[in-house]
């Protein structure tokens, strides 16, 4: 299991495999590209076909070696139930969930300090991070380029998460960041935020390509195209990700509550349990805003994410219903045809 240990293999993981009676070798998916996965097993790396399974970076899997001589691609036989899943609503708007990384212990929300802070975006990423059950940490990058102090601003939008200022060129903040991450660590954030630079700095070598941000609009280029895992030693495994353009909520109610603890706390005191904090009587949240005890922007951001979450849930329910109706129609047509043709 030596090579697997570098990818997060622990006695606890071994136990989870022990409960399975599926024949094959344990492995971890370190990359998925164009429908083919790359797994690491105790025998080393192995390309695998998903074989009908949905696999993503970080998945613990049972794989089978290539069946025939000359074939180099193995097969995934089973995917272990995931713990710590980073997921969002599919960007294509097809009301599906997209799993970004599985079996994650720490989520590093990466935010560049040299551009104006977008609190809503950070809150969205944090909701996603909290919802995974992993520990969120905010890395405030490019501290050397910051023109105004954004540290306080970001701490206010990240209650419960530690915020670490880092500067990759001179290495400041790196050891503080390292102290706050454990296990499988995924880096999320906008393109150009400095995720790949951080991964390189933590690894102490250039394993990921980075790209300068365009001067014109401050947008990063998509240099990182896949979610890929890098072992760092000491049980740490880093997953770099491409910049996320849209981060839609997907059954993230618990994550939203955790990202807005002060709003959630007050909401317990609203007269109605399903209070939307809009015009309901006896709303403790609105009262706190009026008294100046609660930030109105935070409340609005919280409301926006909750509404989106409910909307996505309703839409995916509608899609399921639609599919069931279609299946039922196909079935009744088949039954009619059966009797007609007899
Ligand atoms: N000055 C400075 N530049 C940085 C820092 N971190 C990243 N960059 C630069 O920001 C650009 C985008 O970084 P990259 O890691 O590719 O961003 P990613 O898209 O999030 O992976 C690159 O030109 C990096 O050299 C930092 O701490 N200080
Ligand atoms: Mg990158
Ligand atoms: Zn309320």
Image (cartoon, helix red, strand yellow):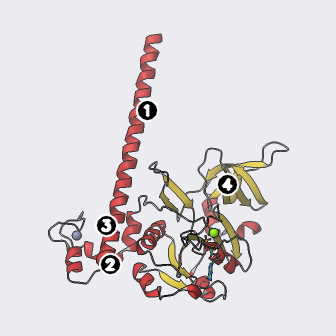
Residue 175 image offset from top left, x and y in percent: 63, 87
Q: Is residue 233 left or right of residue 283?
A: right
Question: Which is nearer the N-term, disc 3 or disc 4?
Answer: 4
Tell which tag, 1 or 4, sits nearer the viewer: 4
Q: Label 1 belongs to which residue?
A: 327
Residue 303's tag is 3
Front-most of 268 and 109? 109
User: Distance from label 3 to label 2 (Cα)?
Assistant: 13 Å
Q: Is residue 110 left or right of residue 309?
A: right
Q: Is residue 292 left or right of residue 96?
A: left
**Tag 3 and tag 4, C-beta contact below 8 Å:** no
Quarter occupied by residue 189: bottom right
Label 4: which secondary element: strand
Residue 262's tag is 2
Q: Residues within 10 Å of mark 1 (few under 14, many from 20)?
A: few
Q: Residues within 10 Å of mark 2 (few under 14, many from 20)?
A: some
Q: Residue at x 69, y 59 (%)?
A: 27
Q: Residues within 10 Å of mark 4 (few under 14, many from 20)?
A: few
Image quarter where ligand 1 lies: bottom right
Label 1: which secondary element: helix
User: Distance from label 1 to label 4 (Cα)?
Assistant: 32 Å
Q: Label 4 belongs to which residue?
A: 33
Question: Which is nearer the N-term, disc 3 or disc 1?
Answer: 3
Question: Which is nearer the N-term, disc 2 or disc 4?
Answer: 4
Label 2: which secondary element: helix
Residue 322 image offset from top left, x and y in percent: 39, 38
User: Distance from label 2 to label 4 (Cα)?
Assistant: 41 Å
Residue 211 visible from this viewpoint: yes
Q: Residue at x 42, y 60 (%)?
A: 249
Tell which tag, 3 or 2, sits nearer the viewer: 3
Question: Which is nearer the N-term, disc 1 or disc 4?
Answer: 4
**Tag 3 and tag 2, C-beta contact below 8 Å:** no
């Amino acid at each position: 299991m030596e090579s697997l240990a570098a990818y997060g293999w622990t006695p606890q993981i071994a136990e989870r495999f022990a409960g399975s009676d599926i024949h094959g070798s344990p492995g971890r998916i370190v990359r998925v590209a164009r429908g083919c996965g790359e797994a690491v097993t105790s025998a080393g790396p192995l390309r695998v076909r998903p074989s009908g399974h949905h696999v993503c970076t970080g998945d613990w899997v049972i794989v089978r070696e290539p069946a025939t001589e000359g074939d180099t691609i193995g097969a995934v036989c089973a995917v272990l139930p995931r713990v710590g899943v980073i997921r969002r609503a599919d960007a294509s708007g097809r009301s599906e969930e997209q799993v970004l990384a599985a079996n994650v212990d720490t989520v590093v929300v990466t935010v560049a300090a040299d551009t104006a802070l977008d609190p809503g975006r950070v809150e969205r990423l944090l909701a996603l991070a909290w919802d995974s059950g992993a520990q969120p940490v905010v890395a405030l990058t490019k501290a050397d380029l910051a023109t105004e102090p954004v540290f306080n601003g970001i701490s206010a939008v990240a209650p419960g998460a530690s915020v670490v200022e880092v500067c990759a060129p001179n290495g400041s903040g790196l050891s503080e960041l390292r102290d706050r991450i454990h296990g499988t660590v995924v880096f999320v954030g906008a393109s150009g935020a400095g995720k790949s630079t951080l991964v390189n700095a933590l690894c102490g070598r250039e394993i990921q390509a980075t790209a300068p941000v365009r001067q014109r609009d401050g947008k990063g280029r998509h240099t990182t195209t896949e979610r890929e895992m890098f072992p760092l030693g000491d049980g740490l495994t880093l997953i770099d990700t491409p910049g996320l353009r849209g981060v839609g909520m997907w059954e993230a109610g618990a994550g939203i509550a955790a990202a807005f603890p002060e709003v959630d706390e007050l909401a317990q005191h609203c007269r109605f349990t399903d209070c939307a904090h809009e015009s309901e009587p006896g709303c403790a949240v609105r009262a706190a805003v009026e008294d100046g005890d609660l930030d109105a922007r935070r409340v609005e951001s919280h409301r926006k994410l909750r509404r989106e979450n409910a909307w996505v849930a309703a839409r995916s329910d509608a899609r399921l219903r639609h599919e069931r109706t279609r299946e039922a129609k196909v079935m009744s047509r088949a039954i009619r045809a059966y009797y007609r043709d007899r």
